[in-house]
C-alpha cells in the first residue's frame, strides 16, 4: 500500500551517470520501494559456490552524510540462491566509480545464469553519522558487559 505521506526526503534526487547507455536508468519498481534496482551490464554464468564482481553500468554522487547500501534481491535469493558476498555493500559518498556487485551463487548444485539487463541488486540510500573516533582508557559499565555471541541462550535446537 502506498504511504500518502511519503516524501522524497533527504538530499534527493540522486545524481546518477550511465556509463553504459544501452541499459535503462535504474529505478524503483514502485515509487515507495526502498531499493533502486541495479542492472547487470554483463552476461555471465555463476557455477555453484562461485562469485563474480559484476558491473552495473552506473556511477552516482551520494551526498556526504548518506551512503548507498547494495542489497541482494529476495526473489533471486529464493529462486536461485543468488546473494552478495559483502551484503550489504557500502557505496561511500565520495565514490564516483562504477557500482559493482560481488554476486555469489549459494545454490549447492545449480548454476545461475545472469543476463545483461537483469536486475541483480538494489541500492538503498541511507543517512549515516560521520562520528569521529576518540580513544579512551575505559568504557562505561553495563548489565551486559562483555557477554555476547549467544550468552542469553535460546539456541538449544541448533547444532
Ligand atoms: O558492493 C559494493 C561495495 C563497494 N563498492 C565501491 C564503492 C565504495 O565506496 C568502494 C569501497 O568499498 P569498501 O569501503 O566497502 O571496500 P574496501 O575494501 O574498504 O575498499 P577501499 O579501501 O577502497 O575503501 O567500492 C561497490 O561498487 N560495490
Ligand atoms: Mg573502505
Image (cartoon, helix red, strand yellow):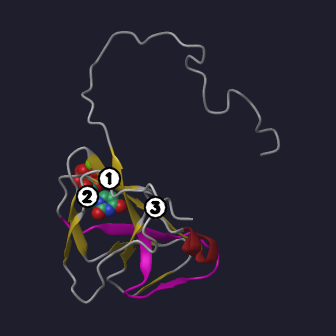
Identify the secondary structure beneath mark 2. loop
Q: Tell me if 102 is positioned left or right of 79 in this view.
A: left
| Mark 1 to mark 3 CA distance (whole Å) | 30 Å
Q: Residues within 10 Å of mark 2 (few under 14, many from 20)?
A: few
Identify the secondary structure beneath mark 1. loop
| Mark 1 to mark 2 CA distance (whole Å) | 7 Å
Residue depicted at 68% across the width and 27% down the height? 151
Which mark is first along the chain, 3 or 1? 1
Q: Tags 1 and 3 in contact by the CB under 8 Å rule?
A: no
Residue depicted at 77% across the width and 35% down the height? 154
Q: Nearer the viewer, residue 92 or 13?
A: 13
Identify the secondary structure beneath mark 3. loop
Q: Tags 1 and 2 in contact by the CB under 8 Å rule?
A: yes
Q: Is residue 69 above or below residue 140?
A: below
Range shown magenta: 97-121
Residue 118: image quadrant is bottom left
Amino acid at each position: 500500500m502506498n504511504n500518502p505521506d511519503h516524501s522524497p526526503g533527504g538530499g534527493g534526487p540522486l545524481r546518477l551517470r550511465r556509463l553504459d547507455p544501452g541499459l535503462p536508468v535504474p529505478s524503483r519498481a514502485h515509487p515507495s520501494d526502498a531499493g533502486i534496482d541495479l542492472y547487470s551490464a554483463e552476461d555471465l554464468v555463476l557455477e555453484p559456490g562461485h562469485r563474480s564482481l559484476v558491473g552495473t553500468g552506473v556511477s552516482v554522487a551520494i551526498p556526504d552524510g548518506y551512503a548507498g547500501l547494495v542489497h541482494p534481491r529476495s526473489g533471486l535469493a529464493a529462486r536461485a540462491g543468488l546473494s552478495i558476498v559483502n551484503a550489504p555493500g557500502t557505496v561511500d559518498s565520495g565514490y564516483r566509480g562504477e557500482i559493482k556487485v560481488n554476486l555469489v551463487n549459494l545454490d549447492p548444485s545449480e548454476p545461475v545464469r545472469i543476463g545483461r539487463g537483469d536486475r541483480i541488486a538494489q541500492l538503498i540510500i541511507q543517512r549515516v553519522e560521520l562520528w569521529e573516533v576518540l580513544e579512551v582508557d575505559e568504557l562505561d559499565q553495563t548489565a551486559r558487559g562483555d557477554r555476547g555471541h549467544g550468552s542469553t541462550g535460546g539456541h538449544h535446537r541448533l547444532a
